[in-house]
Amino acid sequence: MIKSLDFKNLYDLLLFALCFGYPKVPGLSVPIGLIVLGIDGKRFFGLIQRKEIRAFVFISLGFLLMGLVRLIFNETTVSLSKELFFILSQQYKIVIGIYCGSLLYLIIERNPMHIVCYMLVQVSLMVASGVYEGLYTHLLSYQTGSSNNVFNTIFGLRSVGFGLIHNEGVANIVALYFICIADDRIKFVWKIIVDLAIYGSVFMSRMGVLLIILVQLVRKRIAAVVCLIFVLAYVYTIGVREDTILGETFELVLNYQRTGQIATKSSTDIMGMRWLPSSQKEFWLGSGQFFSDEGFYNDTDIGFARIMFFGGIFYVLGYLVLNIWGFFLERVRSNLRRTDLLFLLIIFLVANIKSIILLNWVMVYYVMKSKKYSSHQERPNFDPRLQYNCIK
């Protein structure tokens, strides 16, 4: 499985695991990623000076500036400190995304099986936490206080991983799965194991079912799709209790069995939420609010709507650039199949309908990978292991 112990790669894998999904220090809510950046700061500082990464830094700073300027000219005094904290927390996720994307590139280049092992451990935690309350409670302690309060009351209906939770967690792990199975160095049998194991992540969020099916159709993982069909047929024919984790996961199937309608409670709720501002001023400039006294501004869970309600259409465009601009670089597109590129855009769009979910680490990974290919094409005798010495 792993031919030799590469301690440098295992060390990077540990750093990646401590940052991926944004886990917090239990009891303190301090992001573990800040501690990791403190430890690995010299390498990270060298990373952001690389030409291919510098653009990510400038774009993220520009996005931060847009948010701060809009907050300064906020016309209301409701929860300004809360708004500022939210903007800064998103900026932290952007920085961690740059760091995780670069680490992921290095880890996969050295030994992609290390990422396979990481994924299998995460999925095992997701499955086990849906059954064992003690593990579920412990993994929740690495989340924010608000997430802890919400999910602590629904044990048996959802699961969590280490640092990964709900829609954001499943979007991240499925994107990682997509990258993983595209690597030709991973043996066929391990790809089949990962194909089947990844379905354990759907216990975190039903959104995972849609995203995983899309991945497996794009990547022609026929065996895994057939297995899912059998599971769906079992749920439809035999039925399961709605107040169980399996019932929550396959709510769509159970609703169709009972009412003949293809819908879930969350999808129905989203369709009833506000998608667009009610005035032209708010459309162009936003309101400067992510929150109101009752919760999220305009009581919407839709990620793109939250972005627009805060900063207007230009803030949404900035958010899109922040997450997907790198996919349209010529050297990136030339090393991606069109179906792969389409899926990466779909996973970002679907995820951000459910919430604000940053996936800039995926773009960082592909930009760094394409840089290796372009350098290799320019210099046929080039050894890719010698590249990015400043961040190894």
Image: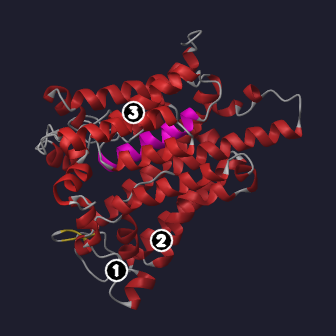
Q: 81 left or right of 188?
A: left
Name the quadrant of the N terminus.
top right
Q: Amino acid at mark 2?
A: Val
- Sort mark 3 into few (<14), some (14-19) or many (20+) by Cα contacts within 10 Å: few
Which sits earlier in the primary sequence, circle 3 or circle 2? 3
Badge 2 marks a residue whose secondary structure is helix
Q: Closest to the observer: 261 or 273?
A: 261
Q: From what the image shows, is residue 211 above or below residue 224?
A: below
- Specify the segment rendered in magenta: 166-181
Residue 294 placement, left or right of 319: left
Task: Tell me the kind of residue under disc 3.
Answer: Cys
**Residue type of the residue flagged with mark 1:** Ser
Q: Name the residue tied to disc 1.
A: 287
Residue holding disc 2: 316
Residue 311 visible within the image: yes
Q: Give the quarter of the figure containing the C terminus.
A: top right
Residue where numbered disc 3 is placed: 227
Which is more N-terminal, label 2 or label 1? 1
Residue 173 inside the magenta-drawn segment = yes
Asked whether, in this view, residue 36 is left or right of residue 6, the answer is left
Q: Is residue 81 visible?
A: no
Q: Position of residue 175 (x, y in %)?
A: 49, 43
Q: SS of the residue at dot 3?
A: helix
Considering every residue shown, the one lying at the far bottom of the view is: 280
